[in-house]
């Protein structure tokens, strides 16, 4: 049964080379994007452990102590969020023209030509900034609600 499915798949790949290559390329691109998003989210979650200035991150948390009750969550969100949003926006500014040029050249080779609109890049930029803000805010709130005595015991 499996050999029949493989034979049919192979015959379809050989018969429809252009459409099969488009499908395989789309699958590869979607898997690559999924792995990239997973890697970025894992990076944002682990940034407090692997940050180059890890000793400064500790000081930021200790200096934003709010009236002896706990840490001020909005100030932590602002401190951590602005850095990652800035880095994400720089990456978008660098990657968008390259992606537009590459996709435009690739799409011109097809019979039915379509153009890439600006809103496609705007949606992807908003999605990237949203993912960055979501991961950073989650970690910032977790750090703000953490008991400071517990962190001092481990040092």
Image (spheres, rainbow, N blue to C red):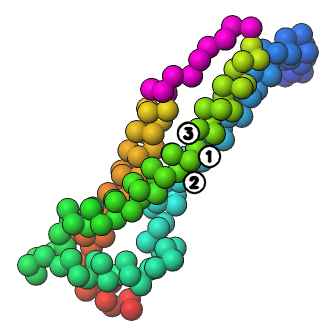
Among numbered discs 3 and 1, the one appearing first in the sequence: 1
Residue placed farthest to the left in the image? 67
Mark 1 and mark 2: Cα distance apart in space: 6 Å
**Disc 2 + disc 3, Cβ < 8 Å:** no
Residue 60, above or below 137: below
Q: Position of residue 126 (x, y in %)?
A: 40, 39
Callout 3 crowding tier (Cα within 10 Å): few <14, some 14–19, many ≥20:
some
Residue 39, above or below 116: below
Q: Is 52 colored magenta in this rendering?
A: no
Q: Residue at 39% across / 62% down in the picture?
A: 83
Image quadrant in which you'd find residue 58: bottom left
Q: Nearer the viewer, residue 142 or 57?
A: 57
Drawn side of residue 97 relative to residue 82, left or right: right
Callout 1 crowding tier (Cα within 10 Å): few <14, some 14–19, many ≥20:
few
Q: Secondary structure at mark 3?
A: helix
Q: Nearer the viewer, residue 48 or 152?
A: 48
Q: Position of residue 103 (x, y in %)?
A: 66, 28
Residue topped by disc 3 = 96
Residue topped by disc 1 = 35
Q: Between tags 3 and 1, which lies in front?
A: 3
Q: Is 114 colored magenta in this rendering?
A: yes
**Disc 3 + disc 1, Cβ < 8 Å:** no
Residue topped by disc 2 = 39
Find the magenta span and give its range: 111-120
Q: Residue at 56% across / 47% down in the picture?
A: 94
**Disc 1 + disc 2, Cβ < 8 Å:** yes
Mark 3 and mark 1: Cα distance apart in space: 19 Å
Q: Is any part of residue 141 visible from this angle?
A: no
Q: Residue at 45% across / 50% down in the picture?
A: 89
Q: Secondary structure at mark 2?
A: helix
Q: Is any part of residue 17 visible from this angle?
A: yes
């Amino acid at each position: 049964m499996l050999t029949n499915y493989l034979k049919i798949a192979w015959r379809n790949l050989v018969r429809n080379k252009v459409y099969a290559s488009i499908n395989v390329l789309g699958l590869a691109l979607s898997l690559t994007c999924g792995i990239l998003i997973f890697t970025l989210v894992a990076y944002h979650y682990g940034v407090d452990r692997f940050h180059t200035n890890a000793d400064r991150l500790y000081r930021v948390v200790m200096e934003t102590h709010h009236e002896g009750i706990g840490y001020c969550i909005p100030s932590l969100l602002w401190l951590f969020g602005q850095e990652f949003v800035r880095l994400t926006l720089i990456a978008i500014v660098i990657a968008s023209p390259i992606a537009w040029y590459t996709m435009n050249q690739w799409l011109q080779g097809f019979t039915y030509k379509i153009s890439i609109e600006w809103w496609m890049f705007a949606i992807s930029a908003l999605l990237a900034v949203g993912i960055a803000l979501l991961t950073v805010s989650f970690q910032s709130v977790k750090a703000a609600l953490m008991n400071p005595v517990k962190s001092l015991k481990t040092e």
